[in-house]
Image: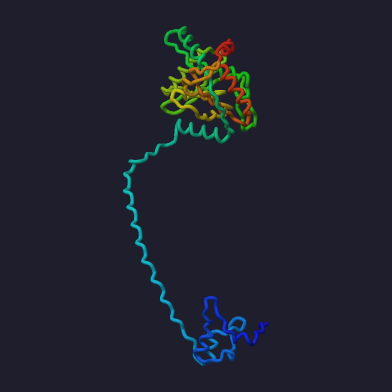
Amino acid sequence: MKPKIHPEYNKLNVTCACGNSFPSASTAKELKVDISAVRGTGPYGRITDEDVRAAAGKPAEKKPEKAPAPAPPAAPAPAAAPAPAPAAPGALEERVPLRGIRRSISENLMRSLQRTAQVSAFDDADLTELVALREQVNKTVPAGTKVSYLAFVVKAVVAALRNHPILNASVDDEKQEIVLKKYYNIGIAIDTPRGLMVAPVRDADRKNIVQISKEIKALVDLANSGQIGVEQLRGGTFTITNIGYFGGLWSTPIINYPEAAILQMQQLRDMPRVINGEIRVRKVMNLCLTIDHRIVDGAEGQRFLNDVKRYLEDPRQLLVEMV
């Protein structure tokens, strides 16, 4: 329903806020039209300029259209970067087939990461007393024989494994069984020209540190010469890797699947330690233990690492275990 307009509405000389009259009033005055007689067609009956002109019989004036603003000049297209010169075939890249030992290493490491839940724990051990003991032992062994720190670590690991047998185990994924080993074949990671190999010192619990040192050296020589047999690389129950020869402070070793754990030795360094309230320089080695968390709880792994550290820091306890 159209609202009713008061008859006096169209007689008002309505002025906008800026002080000017509406165009319809000005046009009516110009064309001498009685605005009160004009019928408005605008909103709410408002008289528009077109209404006044229609009443006067004159068409509405067309407002001149504004010429469109000239478009800004287009920016010049950026010059295309020169195409790199094609490299000579084989100059910057070389493709090497992934096969042989390198392929076996790749497959074994990926299998380990995909089938186990690996977590690592870190600690350091003060080997000052062990360094002194090793020097004494090397003075008494036959000429040409040298007892390594690795041999002492092997004995410390065996002693700790006796206290924590779950780390001397593996998982049979097909049968879903944990296999606890009653023997101690401690694998030694060996860096060779052909890649990483792990050869176990068999029945390490039955051998002394001199025998273990000799066996480790023999395995390393065979691996480096390429004469080690496949059977000599099998049967490990726990692995030790000694990265200390190459430097570095911390890193996390990958488990030698299907074993349950691996221990990594880092570089032996002079480090400050507080002894009886005094700062002294001590021989310190960082250790990292990686466990398969599916079968080894974190607390048990740390207890094992604590035992290894205790045996290495107090060689007298280790000597008792050797008897």
Q: Position of residue 244 (x, y in %)?
A: 46, 23
Q: Position of residue 68 (x, y in %)?
A: 41, 74
Is the C terminus in the top left, top right, bottom left or bottom right quadrant?
Answer: top right
Determine which quarter of the picture holds residue 203: top right
Give the answer, above or below, for where 194 lies relative to 212. Answer: below
Asked whether, in this view, residue 29 is left or right of residue 295, the answer is: left
Q: Residue furthest right?
A: 1
Q: Position of residue 278 (x, y in %)?
A: 52, 17
Q: Is residue 234 visible?
A: no
Asked whether, in this view, residue 216 is left or right of residue 205, the answer is: left
Identify the residue at image location x=50%, y=28%: 250
Q: Residue furthest front?
A: 19
Identify the residue at image location x=62%, y=33%: 174
Asked whether, in this view, residue 226 is left or right of residue 300, the answer is: left
Is the N terminus in the top left, top right, bottom left or bottom right quadrant?
Answer: bottom right
Determine which quarter of the picture holds residue 224: top left
Asked whether, in this view, residue 83 is left or right of residue 172, the answer is: left
- Viewer-side residue, 36 vs 181: 36
- Viewer-side residue, 315 vs 205: 315
Q: Position of residue 275 (x, y in %)?
A: 54, 16
Identify the residue at image location x=41%, y=76%: 67
Q: How many marks?
A: 0
Q: Is residue 283 visible?
A: yes
- Viewer-side residue, 111 vs 271: 271
